Amino acid sequence: MMKQMMSSVQRRAKNKRSSDFKADLSPLSNDWMQHKSLPRSRMSRTVKPTVFVENLPSLQHITNEEQLRLVFMKKVRMCCYVMRFDGIDTPTEAKYKELKRLALIELVQYLAEHAGTLTSRELTELFEMFSCNLFRPLPPGTLEIQGFYNPEEDEPQAETSWPHLSMVYEMLLRLAQSSLINSKIMAKYFDRRFIVNLLVLFDSEDHRERDYLKTILHRIYGKYMALRPFIRKQIHCVFYTVMYTTNRHNGIAELLEILGSIVNGFALPIKKQHKEFLVKVLMPMHAVPFLTLFHPQLSYCVTQFLAKDSALVTKVVPLLIASWPHHDHKKEMLFLNELEEIVETCGPNHLMPVHAPVVTRIAEAINSPHFMVAERAIYLLHNVEAILQCVLSNRATALPILLRGLMGNVQSSGAQPVRWQEQGHWNTTICSLTEELLKLMTELDAPMVEQHQNRASQEHTGRKRSLERREAAWAALEAKESKSNS
């Protein structure tokens, strides 16, 4: 009984909406039908192919105001028909695609000239057309199709419907950045649901679509202050999903570019919620796979926070070192670059509380078996004056750590018990650079360097004697075993 009542209510509501809709859109309602072959998410406001039968004049050749608006509405509704680009077109389908493309070009030109005169009804139809064309299920990615996908090396898929989508995005961008339309009117269309649908599209593999989305979302964020907290929250949700669920997303770099400009505009002092975003979202993003795809944007966001408040370095540096990639030289190079930017942004005074982990990490990078990492770490000491100032100001703690790393690269020093490094670094360029840096350290504090060299020599002698005793013990055991067998 209850199911019958519910179905009756739903039928009445549906019939009422249908009658209201037809009455409101007369005389254009005859062509406004659902296109059954499209996915359910795109069936709500699509049209039948009969809209292409009517021979509509060009908008540029119409002088009558009323007729111009009528033809404009018809062309908007014509563009609501979503074409398929996944196969070979018939002559009729190819003709319809060309008609829609020409209509989209005319609509772009019309908005460039008459954006300020758009009525509420015209805006409603335009946004319905945007929804029909843009808000779609994204096609299966390369990973789903091929079973493997490395975004650092493989070519991403291009959007097949881009000839139409590009002009739809151009219209949406013109509306988003137009100053001729009242922002209070446009706020009804750029609502939260619209923002969520835009953010879903950031996962598209086509970089052209993501560039349009980035610009449009940034314009919306700048014009509509009421939406700013919601936009930030939704971007945070995307990052959380990537970190803890999917580990991949095509639009992270573009979203971080938007956040970088947002952080640059933060007022001082920075709010607590923004600091939590830095600690709980941005810094953990360093552990995401395929970091190389968005690391420049991520590093920019972090340095923008530090440029606003250098005291945040005490939270940033420990989290950065905790995510340090020990076995990936490409990522380690990126981390060294980011560490250099952090140090240059904060200066030596704010770096003092965390100088020990910074110097320790640089010393370990100097001893890296990969020559590019070791070379980058040595140049970091040469080029960044703030690190040398921290070392000089904290000689008792920082200099021994740094000297141990440097002497590990010098031939026959034996300062490090790493087996591959007992005779110094294998790369001669790294050895020469290390010796130059040791000379600089000697000029800064010769007694400390000499003391550490003596200690390293004693450690090396002790290890050598221990190794000799171990070898002698093994030789004695082998002799005893061979004697017993004979």
Image (cartoon, rainbow, N blue to C red):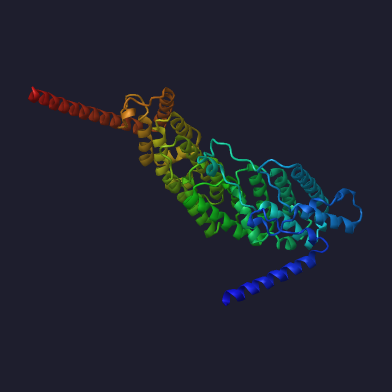
Q: Nearer the viewer, residue 388 or 269?
A: 269
- Which image quarter: residue 426? top left
Is residue 315 among the parts visible in the rendering?
yes
Q: Residue at x 47, y 52 (%)?
A: 244
Q: Determine whether 89 is above or below 484 in the image.
A: below
Residue 207 location, x and y as percent? 63, 42
Question: From what the image shows, is residue 119 above or below residue 97?
Answer: below
Q: Quick check: 152 left or right of 33?
A: left
Q: Nearer the viewer, residue 450 or 284?
A: 284
Looking at the picture, tell me which residue is in the foreground, 42 or 306: 42
Q: Is residue 144 above or below residue 406?
A: below
Residue 160 pos. (x, y %): 66, 42
Q: Nearer the viewer, residue 302 or 270?
A: 302
* Location of the N terminus (image quadrant): bottom right
Quadrant in which residue 184 is drawn: bottom right
Q: Position of residue 334 (x, y in %)?
A: 50, 38
Residue 283 appears in view? no
Q: Residue furthest bottom?
A: 1
* Relative horizontal placement of residue 304, taking residue 404 as reference (left or right): right
Residue 407, quarter of picture: top left
* Tally of numbered tags: 0
Image-based side of 441 in relation to 239, left or right = left
| Horizontal relation, residue 331 to residue 58: left or right | left
Q: Quadrant of the C terminus?
A: top left
